[in-house]
Amino acid sequence: MKDKLQGIKEKALEQIKLTDSLDKLNEIRVAVLGKKGELTEVLKGMKDVAPEDRPMVGQLVNETREAIETVLENARKELFAKKRELQLKAEVIDVTLPAKKNNVGHSHPNTLALEEIKKIFIGMGYEVDDGPEVEYDYYNFEALNIPANHPAKDEQDTFYINDKIVLRTQTSPVQARVMEKGKLPIRMISPGRVYRADEVDATHSPCFHQVEGLVIDEGVTFADLKGTLAEFARELFGPDTKVKFRPHHFPFTEPSAEMDVSCFKCGGKGCRFCKGEGWIEILGCGMVHPHVFEMCGIDKEKYTGFAFGVGLERVALLKYEIDDMRLLYENDTRFLKQF
């Protein structure tokens, strides 16, 4: 038994001496000292040892275990120190190198323009409302004085889910929904994504954004509309901005108008930016049509109001001098980070 234990010890020490990795060292520990290791097997054979020899054999086993464990621990510390030294050499940090810059995102031009528009109207006491992009044909057309077979439907060719549900062509349905609630007076804007079956080019997209506004109260006149939108234009494009209203037709307003702003590049003198005209078309507006009041359950004899709508992309294109709408949706960071 003594010779067997001596053999186990010498073999283990020799293996430990030749080991060059912590993993191999652990394998030796398990093979010798583990539950199924060589020393454990010797202990299991103690039942075959004569009772008077068991204390001596047990002492020899313990001495052998302690000797192997001591050498294992010393080898483990030495190998760990070598591994740590190599790791420190491999992972050395050059503090003179420039730090890596954190790549932080940037607000999209549409977002910047929308935040500015919202800030202007919230400052005037308006609320911001939103509604579904998948809308009933009733709210998108009929409630806005655009019945079936109306020519205006051709101008707003849209995507139909079925004969009663469409992808909204404007954010005006939000106004109709707010009017239906009957909580007057109303001062609101409704920004959001809209859809029309347009071909993609420099100024058109089948998916774009609008910001529409609505005011309803007693005694509201076209003068209130002009004053509100003139102030909006000055806040958005500069204090010297002038506005001009041209007669137009929209089914849900009467009278209706298109509003132009004086070119904020040349001051109205005429330049490449405004195509030499001195004016830039910016939005459509008008007094809410009496029939729209009737459809939404509002007393047209007591209340009047005005509405307006501006394309968000148009504001962004003008404000940041972008000449192609498609650039807004290509997600090229070289372009977007300029703003």
Image (cartoon, grey):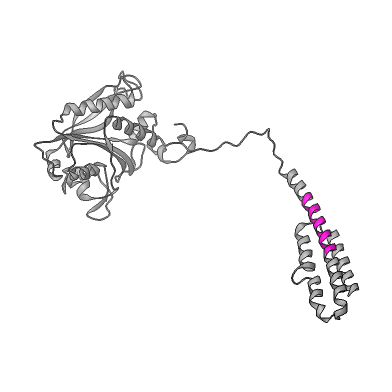
Location of residue 162 in the rendering, given as x and y in whole percent from the top left corner: 25, 56
The N terminus, quarter of image:
bottom right
Residue 271 on image: x %, y %: 34, 21
Q: Is residue 29 left or right of residue 219?
A: right
The prevailing secondary structure element of the residues shown in magenta is helix
Relative to residue 219, is residue 164 depicted above or below?
below
- Residue at the farthest left position: 301
Residue 85: x percent and y percent?
77, 46
Q: Quadrant of residue 100?
A: top right
> In this orientation, does residue 55 appear?
yes
**Residue 84 vertical position relative to residue 311 in the rendered view, above or below:** below
**Segment tinted magenta in the rendering:** 66-81
Is 242 magenta? The answer is no
Q: Can you give x and y, in whole percent of width and height, for residue 4 in the image?
A: 88, 73
Task: Give the residue at the far right of this rendering.
Answer: 3
Q: Residue at x 31, y 30 (%)?
A: 120
Of 166 and 31, nearer the camera is: 31
Quadrant the C terminus occupies: top left
**Could you say which is closer to the camera, residue 311 or residue 149?**
311
| Res 324 visible | no
Identity of the residue drawn at 33% across and 31% down: 119
Q: Tell me the quarter of the picture where residue 60 sits.
A: bottom right
